Image (cartoon, helix red, strand yellow):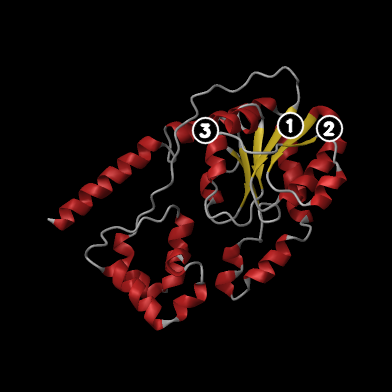
Amino acid sequence: MDVFTSFNRKAMKNPLVKKIIMSALMSDKCRKILPQSNAAKTDLKMALGEKDYDKIKHKVEVLYLAMRACKKEKLKRKDNKFIISFVGREFYNKGGHDLFAAFKILREKYGDKIELKFKGDVPERYRKTKIPGIRFIEGYLSRDKLFDEMYLGVDVFVMPTHTDNYGVVFLEAMSAGIPIIGTTSFTVPELIDDGKNGFLIESPYSWENYIPHGKTIGQLIKDLEKPHPEIVKQLVEKLSILIENKKLCEKMGKKAREIIETGRLSIEKRNENLGRIYKEALRLKN
């Protein structure tokens, strides 16, 4: 919903702004409103208010982002390591420090059996800690290189994000056939079927627990930069399960790819729904 006001949610309190937005949404030329997730649909309802949302709810239908399954096969490795992957900008917002803390504990527990490949911005003080087993992947990677380096040759993708409104990297990882671990933030729970294609980490640090309740962005940012022992503990627990159960890890990876190939996040399913939506819109026009 924030895209209507350039992410200035306070603008929605301006009657004129609200009137302009509602006029556009209620127009006969607006035949469908397609939020990309149920989380986005809920946000739309919260931003408009229940009374105004009721006026346009018959137009609202969730249409998920989709992705084609990766055509490449997973890389065959002979190192017997368990490799964790992270891809994401905004170190604190994406939970980079939580993953570092969890990995440090896991490294002490499993030794050089595990490795973390980290692609993203990292504050200098974290680089200087030099935790054994962390490899920083630097520079630009083409899409092919990104998949080879960060998805096809690893065992699990982890991003304990707090600020993603969707998280396309989760879809990329799923398309490569690896399990995913993320937080209960906005759309992420709609991508992760907990215990089936990955694990969900409970987290109170997401904007929907702040901004709609009168808390500021500044307060959220400060809280994100703090240590989160409750999140670190969950990351250690869930990753330990996969490290110690290779068959489960592989099973989750297959389920993840299945969701991309033929499930709710497949191109075919998206196109089927989109085709129906266009036909309905054309019937309404006539």
Of marks 1 and 3, the one in the foreground: 3
Q: Residue 204 lies in what quarter of the image?
A: bottom right
- Nearest the viewer among 96 and 53 is 96
Badges 1 and 3: C-beta atoms under 8 Å apart?
A: no
Q: Nearer the viewer, residue 109 or 3?
A: 3
- Locate residue 109, reporting x and y percent: 85, 36
Whole-number angstrom distance, CA of label 1 to CA of label 3: 21 Å
- The answer to which quarter of the image holds residue 53 is bottom left
Q: Residue furthest left?
A: 286
Which secondary structure, mark 2?
Answer: helix
* Residue that mark 2 sits on: 110
Counting residues from the N terminus, which is met first, the one under dot 2 or under dot 1?
2
Q: Disc 3 versus disc 2: distance between alpha carbons?
A: 28 Å
When the figure is inspected, residue 200 is found, relative to residue 152, above or below; the finding is below
Closer to the N terminus: mark 3 or mark 2? 2
Nearer the observer, 59 or 28: 28
The image shows a total of numbered marks equal to 3
- Residue drawn at (45%, 38%), measured in percent from left and top? 67
Q: Residue at x 54, y 37 (%)?
A: 172
Around disc 2, counting alpha carbons within 10 Å, would you say few (fewer than 14), some (14 to 19), or many (20 or more)? few
Amino acid type, residue under disc 2 in the picture: Tyr
**Residue beneath label 1, please?**
243
Taking the spot 66% from the left edge, 61% from the top edge, the residue there is: 205
Which label sits in the foreground, 3 or 2? Answer: 3
Mark-to-mark CA distance, 2 and 1: 9 Å
Q: Is residue 196 visible?
A: no
Report which quarter residue 263 is drawn in. Answer: top left
Q: Residues within 10 Å of mark 1 (few under 14, many from 20)?
A: many
- Is residue 56 positioned above or below 148 on the image? below
In this view, the residue in front, 29 or 59, is 29
Task: Please give the residue where the numbered disc 3 appears in the rendered image.
Answer: 175
The answer to whether the residue labelled 2 contacts the one labelled 1, judged by CB atoms less than 8 Å apart, is yes
